[in-house]
Protein backbone atom coordinates (compact mmCIF):
# COMPACT_ATOMS: atom_id res chain seq x y z
CA UNK A 1 0.00 0.00 0.00
CA UNK A 2 1.48 3.41 -0.90
CA UNK A 3 2.87 5.40 1.98
CA UNK A 4 1.08 8.66 2.77
CA UNK A 5 3.77 11.35 2.81
CA UNK A 6 4.45 13.28 6.01
CA UNK A 7 2.69 16.58 5.41
CA UNK A 8 3.69 18.40 8.62
CA UNK A 9 6.30 20.50 6.82
CA UNK A 10 3.79 21.47 4.14
CA UNK A 11 1.21 22.47 6.76
CA UNK A 12 3.86 24.54 8.55
CA UNK A 13 4.76 26.25 5.27
CA UNK A 14 1.13 27.25 4.73
CA UNK A 15 0.94 28.49 8.35
CA UNK A 16 4.12 30.53 7.90
CA UNK A 17 2.83 32.05 4.67
CA UNK A 18 -0.45 32.91 6.36
CA UNK A 19 1.37 34.62 9.23
CA UNK A 20 3.55 36.53 6.78
CA UNK A 21 0.46 37.59 4.85
CA UNK A 22 -1.22 38.78 8.05
CA UNK A 23 1.89 40.70 9.04
CA UNK A 24 1.98 42.36 5.62
CA UNK A 25 -1.75 43.09 5.70
CA UNK A 26 -1.66 44.64 9.18
CA UNK A 27 1.54 46.59 8.52
CA UNK A 28 -0.01 48.24 5.46
CA UNK A 29 -3.27 48.80 7.32
CA UNK A 30 -1.54 50.50 10.25
CA UNK A 31 0.10 52.98 7.89
CA UNK A 32 -3.34 54.53 7.35
CA UNK A 33 -3.07 56.45 10.62
CA UNK A 34 0.13 58.12 9.48
CA UNK A 35 -1.10 58.94 5.97
CA UNK A 36 -4.23 60.48 7.49
CA UNK A 37 -2.22 62.54 9.96
CA UNK A 38 0.13 63.81 7.24
CA UNK A 39 -2.65 64.23 4.64
CA UNK A 40 -0.65 62.10 2.21
CA UNK A 41 -3.61 61.01 0.10
CA UNK A 42 -1.44 59.68 -2.73
CA UNK A 43 0.33 57.34 -0.30
CA UNK A 44 -3.06 56.24 1.08
CA UNK A 45 -4.19 55.27 -2.43
CA UNK A 46 -0.92 53.42 -3.06
CA UNK A 47 -1.27 51.52 0.21
CA UNK A 48 -4.80 50.45 -0.74
CA UNK A 49 -3.51 48.96 -4.00
CA UNK A 50 -0.55 47.27 -2.31
CA UNK A 51 -2.78 45.66 0.30
CA UNK A 52 -5.15 44.25 -2.33
CA UNK A 53 -2.25 42.46 -4.03
CA UNK A 54 -0.64 41.02 -0.88
CA UNK A 55 -2.97 38.01 -0.47
CA UNK A 56 -2.46 36.75 -4.02
CA UNK A 57 1.30 37.20 -3.72
CA UNK A 58 1.54 35.05 -0.59
CA UNK A 59 -0.72 32.34 -2.04
CA UNK A 60 1.53 32.28 -5.13
CA UNK A 61 4.59 31.95 -2.90
CA UNK A 62 3.31 29.13 -0.70
CA UNK A 63 1.92 27.16 -3.61
CA UNK A 64 5.48 26.86 -4.90
CA UNK A 65 6.73 25.88 -1.43
CA UNK A 66 4.09 23.18 -1.01
CA UNK A 67 4.80 21.76 -4.45
CA UNK A 68 8.49 21.59 -3.55
CA UNK A 69 7.82 19.87 -0.21
CA UNK A 70 5.24 17.33 -1.42
CA UNK A 71 6.84 16.67 -4.80
CA UNK A 72 5.04 13.84 -6.54
CA UNK A 73 2.46 13.69 -3.75
CA UNK A 74 1.18 17.18 -4.50
CA UNK A 75 -2.22 15.77 -5.54
CA UNK A 76 -2.37 13.06 -2.87
CA UNK A 77 -5.62 13.84 -1.11
CA UNK A 78 -4.58 11.83 1.96
CA UNK A 79 -1.61 14.14 2.39
CA UNK A 80 -3.84 17.19 2.15
CA UNK A 81 -6.33 15.70 4.60
CA UNK A 82 -3.51 15.37 7.13
CA UNK A 83 -2.25 18.84 6.24
CA UNK A 84 -5.64 20.29 7.08
CA UNK A 85 -5.64 18.66 10.52
CA UNK A 86 -2.09 19.77 11.22
CA UNK A 87 -2.78 23.31 10.02
CA UNK A 88 -5.86 23.50 12.26
CA UNK A 89 -3.70 22.60 15.26
CA UNK A 90 -1.09 25.20 14.30
CA UNK A 91 -3.62 28.09 14.14
CA UNK A 92 -5.94 26.96 16.95
CA UNK A 93 -6.77 29.70 19.43
CA UNK A 94 -5.96 32.61 17.11
CA UNK A 95 -8.40 35.49 16.96
CA UNK A 96 -8.31 35.32 13.16
CA UNK A 97 -8.66 31.55 12.81
CA UNK A 98 -11.45 31.89 10.22
CA UNK A 99 -9.14 34.02 8.06
CA UNK A 100 -6.43 31.34 8.41
CA UNK A 101 -8.82 28.63 7.27
CA UNK A 102 -9.81 30.65 4.21
CA UNK A 103 -6.11 31.08 3.38
CA UNK A 104 -5.59 27.30 3.57
CA UNK A 105 -8.61 26.76 1.31
CA UNK A 106 -7.17 29.23 -1.21
CA UNK A 107 -4.03 27.11 -1.46
CA UNK A 108 -5.94 23.85 -1.89
CA UNK A 109 -8.13 25.32 -4.61
CA UNK A 110 -5.10 26.69 -6.40
CA UNK A 111 -3.53 23.21 -6.48
CA UNK A 112 -6.64 21.15 -7.23
CA UNK A 113 -8.83 23.57 -9.24
CA UNK A 114 -11.68 22.22 -7.15
CA UNK A 115 -15.18 22.30 -8.62
CA UNK A 116 -17.56 23.27 -5.83
CA UNK A 117 -16.03 22.32 -2.49
CA UNK A 118 -13.98 19.35 -1.35
CA UNK A 119 -14.98 18.52 2.26
CA UNK A 120 -12.03 16.15 2.74
CA UNK A 121 -9.33 18.78 2.25
CA UNK A 122 -11.04 22.14 2.84
CA UNK A 123 -12.34 23.85 5.95
CA UNK A 124 -16.12 24.10 5.93
CA UNK A 125 -18.55 26.31 7.83
CA UNK A 126 -16.47 27.89 10.58
CA UNK A 127 -18.34 29.64 13.35
CA UNK A 128 -19.73 33.02 12.40
CA UNK A 129 -20.46 36.07 14.54
CA UNK A 130 -23.54 35.51 16.65
CA UNK A 131 -26.88 37.21 16.10
CA UNK A 132 -26.79 40.99 16.52
CA UNK A 133 -28.43 40.92 19.95
CA UNK A 134 -25.81 38.51 21.35
CA UNK A 135 -22.91 40.99 21.49
CA UNK A 136 -22.23 41.83 25.14
CA UNK A 137 -22.12 45.28 26.62
CA UNK A 138 -18.68 46.87 26.67
CA UNK A 139 -16.91 46.30 29.95
CA UNK A 140 -14.60 49.30 29.98
CA UNK A 141 -15.95 52.26 31.92
CA UNK A 142 -15.05 55.91 32.01
CA UNK A 143 -13.38 56.01 28.63
CA UNK A 144 -10.36 54.12 27.41
CA UNK A 145 -7.21 54.74 25.41
CA UNK A 146 -7.84 54.42 21.68
CA UNK A 147 -4.35 55.48 20.59
CA UNK A 148 -2.43 52.71 18.92
CA UNK A 149 -4.83 49.99 20.03
CA UNK A 150 -4.94 47.33 17.35
CA UNK A 151 -7.59 44.94 18.64
CA UNK A 152 -11.31 45.30 18.28
CA UNK A 153 -12.24 42.53 20.72
CA UNK A 154 -12.73 45.21 23.39
CA UNK A 155 -14.27 48.61 23.01
CA UNK A 156 -14.15 51.82 24.97
CA UNK A 157 -17.23 52.96 26.88
CA UNK A 158 -18.17 56.57 27.62
CA UNK A 159 -21.00 57.02 30.15
CA UNK A 160 -23.47 59.77 29.38
CA UNK A 161 -24.11 60.70 33.01
CA UNK A 162 -22.46 64.10 32.55
CA UNK A 163 -23.98 64.75 29.14
CA UNK A 164 -23.15 63.90 25.57
CA UNK A 165 -20.87 66.93 25.05
CA UNK A 166 -18.52 65.76 27.81
CA UNK A 167 -18.58 62.18 26.55
CA UNK A 168 -17.88 63.19 22.95
CA UNK A 169 -15.06 65.50 23.97
CA UNK A 170 -13.39 62.74 25.99
CA UNK A 171 -13.85 60.30 23.12
CA UNK A 172 -12.28 62.64 20.55
CA UNK A 173 -9.32 63.44 22.80
CA UNK A 174 -8.72 59.73 23.42
CA UNK A 175 -8.07 59.23 19.71
CA UNK A 176 -4.64 60.77 20.33
CA UNK A 177 -4.02 61.65 16.71
CA UNK A 178 -0.81 63.60 16.20
CA UNK A 179 -2.70 66.55 14.70
CA UNK A 180 -4.32 69.32 16.72
CA UNK A 181 -8.05 69.92 16.57
CA UNK A 182 -9.32 73.13 14.97
CA UNK A 183 -11.79 73.57 17.83
CA UNK A 184 -12.60 70.46 19.81
CA UNK A 185 -15.08 72.25 22.09
CA UNK A 186 -17.00 73.49 19.06
CA UNK A 187 -17.06 70.02 17.53
CA UNK A 188 -18.05 68.24 20.74
CA UNK A 189 -20.90 70.68 21.27
CA UNK A 190 -22.13 70.52 17.66
CA UNK A 191 -21.83 66.73 17.57
CA UNK A 192 -23.68 66.39 20.88
CA UNK A 193 -26.53 68.54 19.57
CA UNK A 194 -27.01 66.17 16.62
CA UNK A 195 -26.68 63.10 18.83
CA UNK A 196 -29.15 64.36 21.43
CA UNK A 197 -31.67 65.34 18.77
CA UNK A 198 -31.46 61.96 17.02
CA UNK A 199 -31.56 59.93 20.23
CA UNK A 200 -34.48 61.94 21.61
CA UNK A 201 -36.43 61.18 18.45
CA UNK A 202 -36.20 57.45 19.19
CA UNK A 203 -37.96 57.90 22.55
CA UNK A 204 -37.25 56.38 25.97
CA UNK A 205 -35.35 54.86 27.67
CA UNK A 206 -32.62 57.49 27.99
CA UNK A 207 -29.15 56.68 26.61
CA UNK A 208 -26.66 55.22 29.11
CA UNK A 209 -23.33 55.09 27.30
CA UNK A 210 -21.45 55.47 24.04
CA UNK A 211 -19.48 52.34 23.11
CA UNK A 212 -16.90 52.47 20.33
CA UNK A 213 -14.52 50.04 18.73
CA UNK A 214 -10.94 50.86 19.68
CA UNK A 215 -9.26 51.23 16.27
CA UNK A 216 -10.14 54.03 13.91
CA UNK A 217 -11.56 53.14 10.50
CA UNK A 218 -9.60 54.90 7.74
CA UNK A 219 -10.64 55.25 4.10
CA UNK A 220 -9.27 57.68 1.53
CA UNK A 221 -9.28 61.12 3.19
CA UNK A 222 -11.46 60.22 6.16
CA UNK A 223 -11.24 58.61 9.60
CA UNK A 224 -14.28 57.18 11.34
CA UNK A 225 -15.04 56.34 14.94
CA UNK A 226 -17.45 53.39 14.77
CA UNK A 227 -19.66 52.84 17.76
CA UNK A 228 -23.14 52.67 19.22
CA UNK A 229 -25.30 54.27 21.89
CA UNK A 230 -26.97 51.98 24.42
CA UNK A 231 -30.42 52.92 25.68
CA UNK A 232 -31.65 50.01 27.76
CA UNK A 233 -31.65 47.09 25.33
CA UNK A 234 -31.87 49.38 22.31
CA UNK A 235 -28.74 50.03 20.28
CA UNK A 236 -28.37 53.11 18.09
CA UNK A 237 -25.50 53.25 15.56
CA UNK A 238 -22.99 56.06 16.02
CA UNK A 239 -20.43 56.94 13.34
CA UNK A 240 -18.23 59.99 13.74
CA UNK A 241 -16.61 61.21 10.49
CA UNK A 242 -13.35 63.06 11.13
CA UNK A 243 -11.42 65.18 8.64
CA UNK A 244 -7.87 66.47 8.64
CA UNK A 245 -7.72 69.79 6.85
CA UNK A 246 -5.17 72.58 6.51
CA UNK A 247 -6.20 73.94 9.93
CA UNK A 248 -6.29 70.61 11.74
CA UNK A 249 -8.84 67.99 12.74
CA UNK A 250 -12.55 68.56 12.71
CA UNK A 251 -15.66 66.48 13.26
CA UNK A 252 -17.57 66.57 9.98
CA UNK A 253 -20.63 64.42 10.63
CA UNK A 254 -22.45 62.45 13.32
CA UNK A 255 -24.43 59.57 11.79
CA UNK A 256 -26.98 57.73 13.91
CA UNK A 257 -29.19 55.54 11.72
CA UNK A 258 -28.81 52.04 10.38
CA UNK A 259 -29.30 53.28 6.84
CA UNK A 260 -26.54 55.86 7.24
CA UNK A 261 -24.18 53.24 8.66
CA UNK A 262 -25.09 50.85 5.85
CA UNK A 263 -24.27 53.47 3.20
CA UNK A 264 -20.89 54.21 4.81
CA UNK A 265 -20.16 50.45 4.82
CA UNK A 266 -21.74 49.94 1.40
CA UNK A 267 -20.81 47.21 -1.09
CA UNK A 268 -20.21 50.08 -3.51
CA UNK A 269 -17.34 51.56 -1.48
CA UNK A 270 -13.68 50.76 -1.02
CA UNK A 271 -12.56 48.69 1.94
CA UNK A 272 -11.62 50.34 5.22
CA UNK A 273 -8.13 50.21 6.66
CA UNK A 274 -8.75 49.14 10.24
CA UNK A 275 -6.27 46.98 12.15
CA UNK A 276 -8.05 44.29 14.17
CA UNK A 277 -6.62 41.08 15.58
CA UNK A 278 -10.05 39.50 15.97
CA UNK A 279 -12.07 40.13 12.80
CA UNK A 280 -14.91 37.88 13.97
CA UNK A 281 -15.61 40.00 17.04
CA UNK A 282 -15.26 43.23 15.07
CA UNK A 283 -17.84 41.95 12.57
CA UNK A 284 -20.05 40.89 15.48
CA UNK A 285 -19.97 44.47 16.77
CA UNK A 286 -20.74 45.85 13.31
CA UNK A 287 -23.74 43.54 13.04
CA UNK A 288 -25.31 45.26 16.03
CA UNK A 289 -25.28 48.47 13.98
CA UNK A 290 -26.32 46.93 10.65
CA UNK A 291 -28.16 43.65 11.36
CA UNK A 292 -29.50 43.41 7.80
CA UNK A 293 -26.12 43.67 6.09
CA UNK A 294 -24.68 40.32 4.94
CA UNK A 295 -21.81 39.04 7.08
CA UNK A 296 -19.60 38.57 4.02
CA UNK A 297 -19.96 42.25 3.14
CA UNK A 298 -18.97 43.25 6.67
CA UNK A 299 -15.81 41.14 6.46
CA UNK A 300 -15.01 42.68 3.08
CA UNK A 301 -15.64 46.18 4.41
CA UNK A 302 -12.82 45.81 6.96
CA UNK A 303 -10.44 44.57 4.26
CA UNK A 304 -11.00 40.81 4.68
CA UNK A 305 -12.45 40.49 1.19
CA UNK A 306 -11.18 36.94 0.64
CA UNK A 307 -12.98 35.68 3.72
CA UNK A 308 -15.97 37.79 2.69
CA UNK A 309 -15.98 35.77 -0.52
CA UNK A 310 -15.86 32.54 1.50
CA UNK A 311 -18.82 33.64 3.61
CA UNK A 312 -20.77 34.64 0.49
CA UNK A 313 -20.09 31.25 -1.10
CA UNK A 314 -21.30 29.40 1.98
CA UNK A 315 -24.37 31.59 2.17
CA UNK A 316 -25.20 30.76 -1.46
CA UNK A 317 -24.74 27.05 -0.86
CA UNK A 318 -26.91 27.08 2.27
CA UNK A 319 -29.61 28.98 0.41
CA UNK A 320 -29.63 26.55 -2.50
CA UNK A 321 -29.59 23.55 -0.16
CA UNK A 322 -32.49 24.86 1.91
CA UNK A 323 -34.71 25.93 -1.01
CA UNK A 324 -35.87 24.82 -4.41
CA UNK A 325 -35.00 28.23 -5.80
CA UNK A 326 -34.52 28.25 -9.57
CA UNK A 327 -31.70 30.04 -11.35
CA UNK A 328 -33.39 32.54 -13.65
CA UNK A 329 -32.35 35.37 -15.95
CA UNK A 330 -31.95 38.65 -14.07
CA UNK A 331 -34.61 41.33 -14.66
CA UNK A 332 -33.75 43.98 -17.19
CA UNK A 333 -32.40 44.10 -20.72
CA UNK A 334 -30.24 41.07 -21.61
CA UNK A 335 -26.55 41.89 -21.48
CA UNK A 336 -24.64 42.10 -24.73
CA UNK A 337 -21.39 41.05 -23.02
CA UNK A 338 -22.65 39.07 -20.01
CA UNK A 339 -25.24 36.41 -19.30
CA UNK A 340 -26.74 37.56 -15.99
CA UNK A 341 -28.80 35.24 -13.78
CA UNK A 342 -29.29 34.22 -10.19
CA UNK A 343 -31.55 32.61 -7.58
CA UNK A 344 -35.01 34.10 -7.87
CA UNK A 345 -35.39 34.93 -4.16
CA UNK A 346 -31.84 36.06 -3.35
CA UNK A 347 -30.39 39.57 -3.77
CA UNK A 348 -27.33 38.25 -5.63
CA UNK A 349 -26.78 37.90 -9.36
CA UNK A 350 -24.15 35.93 -11.29
CA UNK A 351 -22.47 37.31 -14.40
CA UNK A 352 -20.77 35.08 -16.97
CA UNK A 353 -18.87 36.59 -19.89
CA UNK A 354 -20.12 35.61 -23.32
CA UNK A 355 -17.59 33.95 -25.63
CA UNK A 356 -18.38 36.54 -28.31
CA UNK A 357 -20.23 39.70 -27.30
CA UNK A 358 -23.43 40.52 -29.14
CA UNK A 359 -23.02 43.28 -31.72
CA UNK A 360 -22.47 46.21 -31.63
CA UNK A 361 -20.18 45.47 -28.66
CA UNK A 362 -16.56 44.91 -29.67
CA UNK A 363 -14.55 43.42 -26.82
CA UNK A 364 -13.25 40.08 -25.57
CA UNK A 365 -12.97 38.09 -22.36
CA UNK A 366 -9.51 39.36 -21.48
CA UNK A 367 -10.54 43.01 -21.85
CA UNK A 368 -13.70 42.53 -19.79
CA UNK A 369 -11.78 40.81 -16.99
CA UNK A 370 -9.23 43.63 -17.00
CA UNK A 371 -12.02 46.16 -16.53
CA UNK A 372 -13.33 44.21 -13.55
CA UNK A 373 -9.82 44.20 -12.12
CA UNK A 374 -9.74 47.97 -12.63
CA UNK A 375 -12.95 48.30 -10.61
CA UNK A 376 -11.48 46.09 -7.87
CA UNK A 377 -8.40 48.31 -7.64
CA UNK A 378 -10.28 51.62 -7.95
CA UNK A 379 -11.88 53.87 -5.38
CA UNK A 380 -15.52 52.96 -5.99
CA UNK A 381 -16.86 56.17 -4.35
CA UNK A 382 -20.20 54.52 -3.60
CA UNK A 383 -21.03 54.22 -7.31
CA UNK A 384 -19.50 50.91 -8.47
CA UNK A 385 -20.91 47.58 -7.31
CA UNK A 386 -18.28 45.31 -5.78
CA UNK A 387 -17.93 42.17 -7.91
CA UNK A 388 -16.71 38.92 -6.33
CA UNK A 389 -14.84 36.68 -8.74
CA UNK A 390 -15.49 32.93 -8.53
CA UNK A 391 -13.96 29.95 -10.30
CA UNK A 392 -15.43 26.47 -10.71
CA UNK A 393 -18.84 27.11 -9.17
CA UNK A 394 -20.97 23.98 -9.29
CA UNK A 395 -24.74 24.17 -9.77
CA UNK A 396 -27.30 21.39 -10.07
CA UNK A 397 -28.48 21.09 -13.66
CA UNK A 398 -32.09 20.91 -12.49
CA UNK A 399 -31.81 24.37 -10.92
CA UNK A 400 -31.66 26.20 -14.24
CA UNK A 401 -34.83 27.72 -15.65
CA UNK A 402 -35.80 26.54 -19.15
CA UNK A 403 -33.66 28.22 -21.77
CA UNK A 404 -31.10 29.67 -19.36
CA UNK A 405 -28.75 26.69 -19.43
CA UNK A 406 -29.06 26.50 -23.22
CA UNK A 407 -28.05 30.16 -23.43
CA UNK A 408 -25.04 29.64 -21.15
CA UNK A 409 -23.81 26.60 -23.06
CA UNK A 410 -24.36 28.28 -26.41
CA UNK A 411 -22.97 31.73 -25.62
CA UNK A 412 -20.48 31.02 -22.80
CA UNK A 413 -19.36 27.51 -23.63
CA UNK A 414 -15.70 28.39 -23.06
CA UNK A 415 -16.32 28.67 -19.31
CA UNK A 416 -19.49 26.61 -18.76
CA UNK A 417 -19.29 22.81 -18.84
CA UNK A 418 -22.27 20.52 -18.42
CA UNK A 419 -22.15 17.17 -16.67
CA UNK A 420 -25.02 14.74 -16.16
CA UNK A 421 -26.06 16.34 -12.87
CA UNK A 422 -23.78 19.33 -12.25
CA UNK A 423 -22.91 22.42 -14.25
CA UNK A 424 -19.36 23.71 -13.76
CA UNK A 425 -19.16 27.48 -14.23
CA UNK A 426 -15.41 27.91 -14.51
CA UNK A 427 -15.47 31.68 -14.20
CA UNK A 428 -18.12 34.18 -13.09
CA UNK A 429 -18.73 37.25 -10.97
CA UNK A 430 -21.26 37.62 -8.17
CA UNK A 431 -22.78 41.02 -7.39
CA UNK A 432 -25.48 42.35 -5.13
CA UNK A 433 -28.75 42.63 -7.02
CA UNK A 434 -29.97 46.18 -7.67
CA UNK A 435 -32.95 47.39 -9.65
CA UNK A 436 -32.01 48.38 -13.22
CA UNK A 437 -32.45 52.14 -13.55
CA UNK A 438 -34.67 51.93 -16.62
CA UNK A 439 -37.03 49.50 -14.85
CA UNK A 440 -37.06 51.62 -11.71
CA UNK A 441 -38.03 54.77 -13.61
CA UNK A 442 -40.80 52.98 -15.48
CA UNK A 443 -42.80 52.48 -12.28
CA UNK A 444 -41.41 54.93 -9.70
CA UNK A 445 -43.62 57.71 -8.27
CA UNK A 446 -42.96 61.05 -9.93
CA UNK A 447 -41.05 62.60 -7.03
CA UNK A 448 -38.83 59.55 -6.57
CA UNK A 449 -38.12 59.38 -10.29
CA UNK A 450 -36.93 63.00 -10.39
CA UNK A 451 -34.64 62.51 -7.40
CA UNK A 452 -33.17 59.29 -8.81
CA UNK A 453 -32.60 60.81 -12.27
CA UNK A 454 -30.71 63.66 -10.68
CA UNK A 455 -28.69 61.19 -8.63
CA UNK A 456 -27.91 59.34 -11.88
CA UNK A 457 -26.16 62.49 -13.10
CA UNK A 458 -24.38 62.84 -9.78
CA UNK A 459 -23.25 59.21 -10.00
CA UNK A 460 -21.55 59.97 -13.33
CA UNK A 461 -19.82 62.97 -11.75
CA UNK A 462 -18.74 61.01 -8.67
CA UNK A 463 -17.20 58.37 -10.92
CA UNK A 464 -15.39 61.09 -12.85
CA UNK A 465 -13.93 62.34 -9.54
CA UNK A 466 -12.51 58.84 -9.05
CA UNK A 467 -10.93 58.87 -12.54
CA UNK A 468 -13.60 56.55 -13.95
CA UNK A 469 -15.55 57.05 -17.17
CA UNK A 470 -18.32 54.41 -17.38
CA UNK A 471 -18.33 54.49 -21.19
CA UNK A 472 -21.88 53.48 -21.93
CA UNK A 473 -24.25 55.89 -20.14
CA UNK A 474 -27.47 54.10 -21.10
CA UNK A 475 -29.98 53.80 -18.25
CA UNK A 476 -29.96 50.00 -18.43
CA UNK A 477 -26.32 49.93 -17.37
CA UNK A 478 -27.05 51.59 -14.03
CA UNK A 479 -29.06 50.39 -11.07
CA UNK A 480 -30.80 51.70 -7.95
CA UNK A 481 -29.97 50.36 -4.48
CA UNK A 482 -32.48 49.92 -1.68
CA UNK A 483 -31.30 53.28 -0.34
CA UNK A 484 -32.26 54.96 -3.63
CA UNK A 485 -28.66 55.53 -4.74
CA UNK A 486 -27.74 55.12 -8.40
CA UNK A 487 -24.77 52.83 -9.08
CA UNK A 488 -23.00 51.41 -12.12
CA UNK A 489 -22.75 47.66 -12.62
CA UNK A 490 -21.81 47.36 -16.30
CA UNK A 491 -18.05 47.58 -16.73
CA UNK A 492 -17.26 46.34 -20.24
CA UNK A 493 -16.72 49.90 -21.57
CA UNK A 494 -15.39 51.42 -18.36
CA UNK A 495 -12.11 53.31 -18.75
CA UNK A 496 -9.83 55.61 -16.71
CA UNK A 497 -11.13 59.13 -17.26
CA UNK A 498 -7.64 60.56 -17.72
CA UNK A 499 -7.04 58.21 -20.66
CA UNK A 500 -10.12 59.37 -22.57
CA UNK A 501 -9.99 61.98 -25.35
CA UNK A 502 -13.07 64.20 -25.06
CA UNK A 503 -13.95 65.89 -28.35
CA UNK A 504 -16.68 68.06 -29.79
CA UNK A 505 -18.59 66.66 -32.75
CA UNK A 506 -17.23 68.09 -36.07
CA UNK A 507 -19.85 69.90 -38.14
CA UNK A 508 -20.73 68.25 -41.49
CA UNK A 509 -19.30 70.09 -44.47
CA UNK A 510 -22.04 69.16 -46.91
CA UNK A 511 -25.35 67.32 -47.27
CA UNK A 512 -23.63 64.02 -47.97
CA UNK A 513 -21.74 64.09 -44.68
CA UNK A 514 -24.85 65.21 -42.80
CA UNK A 515 -26.88 62.26 -44.17
CA UNK A 516 -24.14 59.66 -43.62
CA UNK A 517 -25.05 56.66 -41.43
CA UNK A 518 -21.44 56.29 -40.27
CA UNK A 519 -19.14 59.01 -38.86
CA UNK A 520 -17.53 61.05 -41.63
CA UNK A 521 -14.55 61.81 -39.39
CA UNK A 522 -11.87 59.71 -37.71
CA UNK A 523 -12.81 58.27 -34.30
CA UNK A 524 -9.93 57.02 -32.14
CA UNK A 525 -10.27 54.10 -29.71
CA UNK A 526 -10.54 56.40 -26.67
CA UNK A 527 -12.41 59.29 -28.29
CA UNK A 528 -15.57 60.41 -26.48
CA UNK A 529 -18.14 62.86 -27.83
CA UNK A 530 -20.14 64.04 -24.79
CA UNK A 531 -22.88 65.79 -26.76
CA UNK A 532 -23.84 62.45 -28.31
CA UNK A 533 -24.86 61.10 -24.92
CA UNK A 534 -27.76 63.55 -24.73
CA UNK A 535 -29.40 61.74 -27.67
CA UNK A 536 -29.40 58.40 -25.84
CA UNK A 537 -30.70 59.34 -22.39
CA UNK A 538 -34.07 57.79 -23.18
CA UNK A 539 -35.86 59.95 -20.62
CA UNK A 540 -39.36 61.41 -20.96
CA UNK A 541 -39.38 65.23 -21.22
CA UNK A 542 -40.13 65.86 -17.53
CA UNK A 543 -37.29 63.66 -16.31
CA UNK A 544 -34.96 64.91 -19.01
CA UNK A 545 -35.59 68.49 -17.88
CA UNK A 546 -34.89 67.49 -14.25
CA UNK A 547 -31.62 65.90 -15.33
CA UNK A 548 -30.56 68.89 -17.41
CA UNK A 549 -31.34 71.33 -14.58
CA UNK A 550 -28.37 69.95 -12.64
CA UNK A 551 -26.22 68.10 -15.12
CA UNK A 552 -26.35 69.76 -18.54
CA UNK A 553 -22.58 70.27 -18.25
CA UNK A 554 -22.07 66.53 -18.79
CA UNK A 555 -22.88 67.02 -22.48
CA UNK A 556 -20.05 69.44 -23.20
CA UNK A 557 -16.32 68.83 -23.29
CA UNK A 558 -15.44 71.55 -20.75
CA UNK A 559 -16.65 69.56 -17.74
CA UNK A 560 -14.69 66.47 -18.70
CA UNK A 561 -11.45 68.16 -19.67
CA UNK A 562 -11.63 70.29 -16.54
CA UNK A 563 -11.95 67.17 -14.39
CA UNK A 564 -9.02 65.59 -16.21
CA UNK A 565 -6.89 68.63 -15.41
CA UNK A 566 -7.82 68.45 -11.72
CA UNK A 567 -6.99 64.75 -11.49
CA UNK A 568 -3.68 65.12 -13.32
CA UNK A 569 -2.66 67.96 -11.00
CA UNK A 570 -3.29 65.78 -7.95
CA UNK A 571 -6.42 67.69 -6.89
CA UNK A 572 -8.70 64.85 -5.81
CA UNK A 573 -12.35 65.99 -5.68
CA UNK A 574 -14.32 64.98 -2.59
CA UNK A 575 -17.24 62.55 -2.59
CA UNK A 576 -19.14 62.08 0.65
CA UNK A 577 -20.78 58.89 1.95
CA UNK A 578 -23.49 60.97 3.62
CA UNK A 579 -25.70 63.85 2.45
CA UNK A 580 -24.54 67.45 2.68
CA UNK A 581 -27.23 68.26 5.23
CA UNK A 582 -25.65 65.82 7.68
CA UNK A 583 -22.36 67.70 7.68
CA UNK A 584 -21.80 69.82 10.78
CA UNK A 585 -20.34 72.59 8.61
CA UNK A 586 -21.51 71.82 5.07
CA UNK A 587 -20.13 75.06 3.69
CA UNK A 588 -16.60 73.76 4.05
CA UNK A 589 -15.08 72.31 0.87
CA UNK A 590 -12.91 69.62 2.40
CA UNK A 591 -14.43 66.15 2.48
CA UNK A 592 -13.49 62.73 3.86
CA UNK A 593 -14.18 60.72 0.72
CA UNK A 594 -13.33 60.82 -2.93
Image (tube, grey):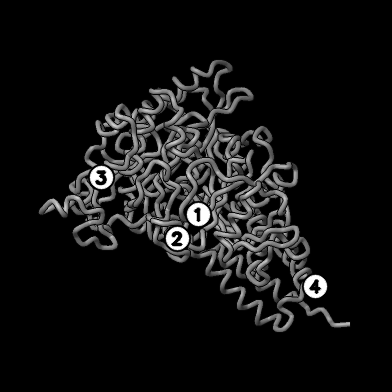
Q: What element does badge 1 sit on?
A: strand
Q: Residue at x 69, y 40 (%)?
A: 130
- Residue 175 against residue 142 in the figure, above or below: below
Precedes in sequence: disc 4 or disc 3: 4
Precedes in sequence: disc 1 or disc 4: 4
Instruction: Name the side, left or right, on which 5 lies relative to 150.
Output: right
Place of residue 299 in the rendered image (x, y in percent of width and height, measured from the top left): 57, 49
Precedes in sequence: disc 1 or disc 2: 1
Precedes in sequence: disc 1 or disc 3: 3
Q: Residue at x 35, y 28 (%)?
A: 450
Residue bearing mark 1: 338
**Nearest to the observer: residue 322 or residue 397:** 397
Instruction: Name the side, left or right, on which 559 lies relative to 444.
Output: left
Place of residue 206 in the rendered image (x, y in percent of width and height, measured from the top left): 55, 18
Which tag is nearer the camera, tag 4 or tag 2? Answer: 2
Instruction: Name the side, left or right, on which 473 lies relative to 162.
Output: left
Which tag is nearer the camera, tag 1 or tag 4? Answer: 1
Disc number placed over residue 269 in the picture, else none: none
Measured Cα–Cα span from mark 1 to mark 2: 10 Å
Mark 3 crowdedness (10 Å alpha carbons): few <14, some 14-19, many ≥20: few
Residue bearing mark 2: 368
Precedes in sequence: disc 3 or disc 2: 3
Residue 151 visible = no
Measured Cα–Cα span from mark 3 to mark 2: 41 Å
Disc number placed over residue 246 in the picture, else none: 3
Which tag is nearer the camera, tag 4 or tag 3? Answer: 4
Which tag is nearer the camera, tag 1 or tag 2? Answer: 1
Residue bearing mark 4: 78
Place of residue 133 in the rendered image (x, y in percent of width and height, measured from the top left): 66, 32
Instruction: Name the side, left or right, on which 149 lies relative to 165.
Output: right
Precedes in sequence: disc 4 or disc 2: 4
Mark 1 crowdedness (10 Å alpha carbons): few <14, some 14-19, many ≥20: many
Amino acid sequence: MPVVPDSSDAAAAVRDAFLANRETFLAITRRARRTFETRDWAAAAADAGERLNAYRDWVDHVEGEVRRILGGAIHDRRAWHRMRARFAALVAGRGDVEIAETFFNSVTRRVFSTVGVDPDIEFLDPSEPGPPDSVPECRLRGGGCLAGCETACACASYPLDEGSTTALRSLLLDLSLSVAWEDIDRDASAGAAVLDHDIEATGPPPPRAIEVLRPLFFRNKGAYVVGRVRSGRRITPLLLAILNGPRGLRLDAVLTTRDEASVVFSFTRSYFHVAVDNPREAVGFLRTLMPAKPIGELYASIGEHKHGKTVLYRHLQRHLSATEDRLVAAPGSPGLVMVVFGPASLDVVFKVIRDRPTRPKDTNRREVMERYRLVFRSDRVGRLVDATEFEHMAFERARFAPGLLDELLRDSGEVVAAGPDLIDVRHMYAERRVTPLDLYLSSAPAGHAVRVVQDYGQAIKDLAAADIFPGDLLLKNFGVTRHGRVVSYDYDELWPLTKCNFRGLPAPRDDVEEAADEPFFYVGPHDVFPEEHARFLGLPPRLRDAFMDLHADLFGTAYWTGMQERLRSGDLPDVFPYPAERRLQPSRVLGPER
